[in-house]
Image: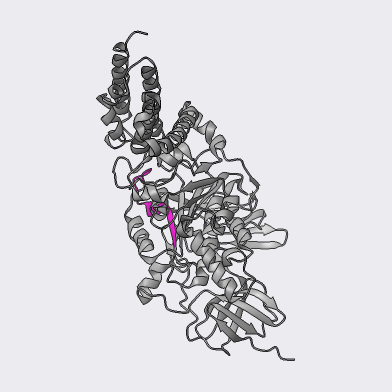
């Protein structure tokens, strides 16, 4: 009996139903219609398949042919990824722009990597060597900042039968032949990997150090461990995207992967224009030489937004497997969750809270749990750190996406509308945020600044006390408070303005090195401790506020750069001298 030709029978936006799909498999990639629109099978019932199409289905009609590929949705892995800009299904946007202009034509087929470009390959092994999955056969210089390792696929092990000499090769050239138990396997620079399947590792490790971002409120108060997961949550206009841009620019990860999933086109355009012009603060080279961008804005096909974060995390895992520390920034997971809600509605699934599908917690867990500090198959320590932006409507942190996200992360940066309106950036609220990585990164900080833990605890306690006093001040005013409590209010304002606030446009203060962070905080808290002693000795608070060094203390973050710690030490000495002189003037007990 002749097998019926698969055809489209129903179209509901990006969700297409096709009959005659008895030979299809779950998550198999199919091509729909004359243009070959890319889709993925997401439900199978007998001969009927439900297909999620990653392109615009306008003008698609029932009766259109459906062709299966026999493979799951996969990404291309190999040299050429770094510095590139992709859409949600790994189509290179610069190539598409050169071919068809500003708009992506439906059915556009472009290889994710250039298979004609030749790369200078340097072998690392010799013929006859015993090889294991994930082991590096050789390397190519992908960019001046990234030495790309050509690894064995995770399912290949055996004896190296042959390997090419040093020279220039394309992604499709056979570089080596490995004798495996199942027979010889050819190895090229190009690999493919299903996006919904995590890449294998040897073991997960405890987080041992922080992801340094150069942002004081994050590194000092609410650190993110390398290999950790964090969420940055806030309402409209609180600065989520700008804060993520800052983290992407300045964090000390070796590979940066920025996923714009569902954000406004103008914000993503700013990223695409700005990043190629940025300089890496650690090397002085262009930042794009260690960055991959994935752009799937709110006006692009909604189904591709759903898969974009899986595309991004798979690319991140690939570089993690080479031994790199990778940072993934997803902006925003709320827009991604809205996609799940829309697709679930079109699939006629039973809605859960606020219309989101009941699978929302599972899908969030599948994303965040693909991060972590690991030992790779090759035995190297590497990590994937994930920072997801959450956009709760009206800044309501009790909504489902924020609440479920907090179940799978250990670091939460809560953006505050009042701080943003007061132009206090980053608008991360010091009382609503938290980090559970403090103990994990404590050993690293103890080597850099032994007093970091004590300073951090002291400043958080100070800010908590100031918040309680502000409630009294709003009722009766500050004048009724004793001077010791007014000192808390005074120093807390210095902490907020002179330490927590940080301008992304200040050349010296956009990035603050850990040593400078601790030096600034140490001075401010020294003023608090010594001031408290002076008030107990009878010195009026007005004399402390009038110290000549206080204005310089407020401006120190912008006056002294990361390489000007000697200037900070001099300012600290002057502050000590002025406080000592004030102590000499204190009335006798």
The residue positioned 36% from the left and 17% from the top of the image is: 534
Residue lying farthest front? 476
Residue lying farthest top? 588
Q: Is residue 401 above or below residue 32?
A: above
Q: Which residues are magenta?
A: 281-294
Residue lying farthest left? 548
The reply to whether residue 560 is visible in this rendering is no
The reply to whether residue 218 is visible in this rendering is yes
Colour scheme employed for the rendering of this structure: one colour
Give the x, y percent position of residue 256.
Answer: 45, 52
Give the x, y percent position of residue 31.
Answer: 56, 79
Q: Is residue 98 left or right of residue 441?
A: left
Q: Is residue 412 left or right of residue 249?
A: right
The residue positioned 58% from the left and 73% from the top of the image is: 345
Q: Between residue 560 and residue 145, name the one nearer to us.
A: 560
Residue lying farthest right? 1
């Amino acid at each position: 009996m002749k097998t019926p030709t698969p055809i489209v029978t129903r179209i509901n936006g990006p969700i297409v139903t096709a009959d005659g799909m008895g030979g299809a498999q779950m998550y198999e990639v199919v091509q729909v219609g004359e243009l070959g629109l890319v889709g993925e099978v997401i439900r199978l019932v007998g001969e009927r398949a439900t297909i999620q199409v990653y392109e615009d289905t306008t003008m698609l009609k029932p009766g259109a042919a459906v062709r299966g590929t026999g493979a799951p949705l996969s990404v291309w892995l190999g040299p050429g990824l770094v510095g590139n800009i992709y859409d949600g299904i790994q189509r290179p946007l610069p190539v598409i722009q050169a071919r068809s202009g500003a708009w992506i034509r439906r059915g556009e087929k472009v290889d994710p990597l250039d298979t004609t470009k030749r790369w200078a390959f340097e072998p690392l092994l010799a013929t006859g060597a015993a090889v294991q999955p994930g082991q590096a056969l050789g390397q190519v210089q992908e960019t001046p900042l990234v030495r790309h390792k050509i690894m064995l696929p995770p399912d290949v092990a055996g004896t190296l039968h042959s390997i090419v000499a040093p020279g220039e090769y394309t992604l499709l050239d056979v570089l080596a032949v490995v004798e495996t138990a199942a027979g010889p396997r050819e190895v090229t620079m190009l690999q493919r990997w299903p996006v919904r399947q995590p890449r294998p590792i040897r073991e997960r490790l405890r987080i041992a150090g922080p992801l340094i971002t150069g942002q004081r409120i994050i590194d000092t108060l609410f650190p993110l461990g390398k290999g950790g997961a964090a969420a940055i949550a806030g309402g409209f206009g609180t600065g989520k995207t700008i804060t993520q841009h800052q983290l992407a620019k300045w964090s000390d990860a070796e590979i940066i992967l920025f996923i714009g999933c569902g954000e406004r086109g103008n914000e993503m355009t700013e990223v695409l224009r700005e990043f190629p012009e940025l300089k890496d603060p650690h090397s002085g080279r262009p930042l794009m030489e260690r960055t991959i961008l994935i752009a799937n804005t709110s006006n692009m096909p909604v189904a591709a937004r759903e898969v974009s974060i899986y595309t991004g995390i798979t690319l991140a895992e690939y570089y993690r497997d080479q031994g790199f520390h990778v940072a993934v920034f997803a902006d925003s997971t709320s827009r991604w969750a809205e996609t799940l809600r829309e697709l679930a509605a079109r699939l006629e699934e039973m809605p859960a809270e606020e219309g989101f599908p009941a699978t929302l917690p599972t899908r969030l867990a599948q994303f965040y749990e693909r991060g972590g500090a690991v030992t790779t198959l090759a035995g190297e320590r590497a990590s994937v750190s994930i920072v997801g932006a959450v956009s709760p409507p009206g800044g309501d942190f009790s909504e489902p996406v924020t609440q479920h996200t907090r179940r799978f992360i250990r670091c939460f940066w809560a953006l505050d509308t009042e701080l943003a309106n007061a132009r206090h950036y980053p608008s991360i609220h010091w009382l609503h945020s938290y980090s559970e990585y403090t103990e994990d990164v404590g050993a690293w900080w103890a080597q850099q600044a032994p007093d970091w833990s004590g300073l951090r605890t002291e400043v958080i306690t100070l800010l908590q006390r100031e918040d309680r006093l502000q409630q009294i001040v709003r009722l009766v005013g500050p004048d009724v408070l004793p001077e010791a409590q007014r000192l808390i209010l005074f120093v807390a304002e210095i902490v907020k303005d002179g330490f927590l606030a940080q301008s992304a446009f200040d050349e010296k203060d956009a990035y603050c090195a850990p040593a400078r962070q601790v030096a600034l905080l140490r001075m401010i808290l020294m003023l608090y401790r010594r001031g408290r002693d002076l008030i107990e000795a009878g010195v009026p608070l007005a004399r402390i506020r009038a110290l000549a060094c206080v204005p310089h203390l407020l401006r120190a973050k912008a006056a002294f750069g990361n390489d000007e710690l000697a200037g900070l030490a001099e300012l600290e000495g002057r502050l000590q001298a002025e406080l000592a002189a004030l102590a000499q003037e204190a009335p006798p007990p």
